[in-house]
Amino acid sequence: MTHGRHSSGSGTPERALIMKVHRRHDRRRGLGLIVISLSILNFLWVVNFYISSFSSSQEDLFELSPQLTHSLSFLNDSEDFGRLVDRLNFNFLLNTKPCDTSSDIFMLVFIHSAPEHYHNRQTIRQTWGLETNLVNDSFRVVFLVGEVQNQSVQLTLEEENKVNQDIIQGNFIDSYRNLSYKYVMGLKWVTYFCRQARYVLKADDDIYIDIFQLVRHIKVSFEVSHGEGLVVCFLIKKPYVKRSQRSKWRVSFAEYPGTYYPSYCSGWAVLMSPLMVYNLYLQSSRVPYFWVDDVYVTGTLVKILGVKHVDITTSMSVNKEYVISWLQNNDTSLPPPFGYPDLSPENIHALWTKTLLYYNKSGTS
Ligand SMILES: *[C@@H]1O[C@H](CO)[C@@H](O)[C@H](O)[C@H]1NC(C)=O
Ligand SMILES: *[C@@H]1O[C@H](CO)[C@@H](O)[C@H](O)[C@H]1NC(C)=O
Ligand SMILES: *[C@@H]1O[C@H](CO)[C@@H](O)[C@H](O)[C@H]1NC(C)=O
Ligand SMILES: *[C@@H]1O[C@H](CO)[C@@H](O)[C@H](O)[C@H]1NC(C)=O
Ligand SMILES: *[C@@H]1O[C@H](CO)[C@@H](O)[C@H](O)[C@H]1NC(C)=O
Ligand SMILES: *[C@@H]1O[C@H](CO)[C@@H](O)[C@H](O)[C@H]1NC(C)=O
C-alpha cells in the first residue's frame, strides 16, 4: 500500500493567509515593526506552503505517471518463456496462434474456462464469440484451461482444439488455487502471441456480451487512450478479505494479512490495453503468488503499476432481474451490454438470438 490516494490538501489555507498578509503588508507600509514581523511570518508561511505543495505535487506526479514500461526487452530473456509467476518449468500443453493470420486485430478475448466446460465454450463460439460477428474489426477468442488428470477429458479437449484451434492449456492443475496462474498465462500468451491486438478483454465462460455494443462503446469512450495503461471493469471497491469458513474464497491471515484488498475488477469482463497486459505480465514474476486471481492481477499488480481503474459500474452495470426481464419482454429494446455471471448456455443462446433480432441481423446459431 505505497501509493497514497489522499493528497494532503494543506496548500489552500496557507495560500489564503499569504494573500491576506500581502494585502496588509501593502496598506501599512509605514509600520516597520509590524511589516518585519509579518514578513517573517509570511516567509515562514511561504516556506511551509512550498514544502507542502511540493510534497503534494510529488504525490500527484506519482499518481499521474504510472510505473509502466514500454520496453519488451524481457522477451529476449530466454528464461522468461518457461516462467509463470513463481513456476520455472511452465509450458503450454496446447497452444494455438490465431492472431498470426492478421496484423491488425481489434480485440483479443481470453476466456477462463475449465477443461470439462465444453458446452460453455461451444455456446460462446456460436454466439457472441463468433469471429465473423464483427465485419471490419477483427477479433479473436481463445479459451484458457489448466492441466487435467483425467486422460479421457484431455483427449476430448485435444479433439475439440483440433476442430476449433482456440484452446490454450498450461501445465498447472486446473484448480481454484491455481487460478492466478491461468490469468497470468493469459497475459503471457497475449504478450508472446497477440501483441498486435488493440484491446484485450478477459472474460469468463459463463457470461453473455453484446459484442456490437461493447465495440461501439470502446470506440466512443476509450479510443483516445488506448496507448496508455488502461483497465476498464466493474470495480469492487475497498473489498473485505473473506475469512468465513463457508466461503470458497476464504483466505487465511497467513495468505493475506490485511483486512481489505486493494480495489479490484470483477473477473467476468475486464478490458485492458496491450501495454497494460505486458506490464502486468512483467510484474507477475516479481510479486509473490496469491491465488485469488482477480485480486492478484487486477488489484495488487495494477496498484503496484500505479494505474487507476476505469470503473464502468454505473454506466454498464448489469443486474440479473433486468437481463431476465429484457429476455422475456416482447418488444426489442437495446440489449443489456453484458449478461450477469453464471448464465446457462441456454440463456446465453436466448440472449444472443434476441440481440441479433434487435440489430436486424440474421441468426447464425
Ligand atoms: C531483442 O534483442 C535484439 C538484439 O539485441 C533487439 O534487436 C530486439 O529489439 C530485442 N527484442 C525486444 C522485444 O526487445
Ligand atoms: C465496413 O467497412 C466498409 C468499408 O469501409 C463499409 O462500407 C461498411 O459499412 C463497414 N461495415 C460495417 C458493419 O461497419
Ligand atoms: C474421466 O472423465 C470421464 C468423462 O467425463 C468420466 O466418465 C470418467 O468417470 C472420468 N474418470 C475418472 C477416473 O474420473
Ligand atoms: C497447481 O498446479 C501445480 C502444478 O500442476 C500443482 O502441483 C499444484 O498441486 C496445483 N495446486 C492446486 C492447489 O491445485
Ligand atoms: C409476449 O407475447 C406472448 C404471446 O404473444 C404472451 O403470451 C406474453 O404474455 C407476452 N409477454 C409479455 C411480457 O408481454
Ligand atoms: C431494424 O429494422 C427496423 C425496421 O427496418 C428499424 O426500425 C430499426 O431501427 C433497425 N434496428 C437497428 C438496430 O438498426
Image (cartoon, rainbow, N blue to C red):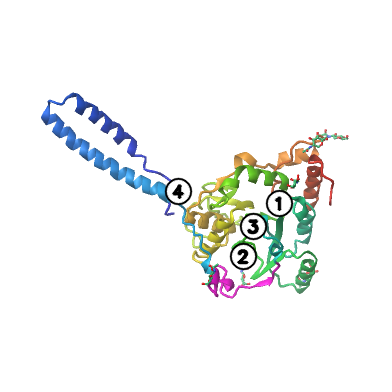
* Closer to viewer: mark 2 or mark 4: 4
- Res. 230 visible in picture: yes
Quarter of the rendered image showing ligand 3: bottom right
* Image location (x, y in percent) of residue 112: 67, 59
Q: Earlier in the sequence, mark 4 or mark 1?
A: 4
In the picture, measured across the screen, residue 220 lies left or right of residue 152, that is: left
Marks 1,3: beta carbons within 8 A: no
Residue kind at label 1, given as amino acid type: Asp
Q: Nearer the viewer, mark 4 or mark 1?
A: 1
Q: Which mark is residue 137?
A: 1
Are the residues tagged 4 and 1 within 8 Å (C-beta)? no
In the picture of the structure, the residue carrying the numbered disc 4 is 64
Q: How far apart are marks 2 and 4 (CA)?
A: 29 Å
- The circle drawn on residue 197 is 3
Q: Report x, y in % for residue 66.
A: 47, 53
Q: Earlier in the sequence, mark 3 or mark 2?
A: 2
Give the CA separation, mark 1 to mark 3. 11 Å
Q: Do the residues labelled 3 and 4 touch (CB within 8 Å)?
A: no
Query: How far separated are the C-alphas under marks 1 and 2?
Result: 25 Å
Helix, strand or loop under label 1: loop
Instruction: Report the magenta residues as a range.
Output: 75-96
Tell me residue 327's x, y (percent).
78, 41
- Residue corresponding to mark 2: 185
Which sits earlier in the primary sequence, circle 1 or circle 2? Answer: 1
- Quarter of the picture containing the N terminus is bottom left
The amino acid marked with disc number 3 is Ala
Task: Kindly tell me whether mark 1's CB lies below 8 Å from ligand 2.
Answer: no
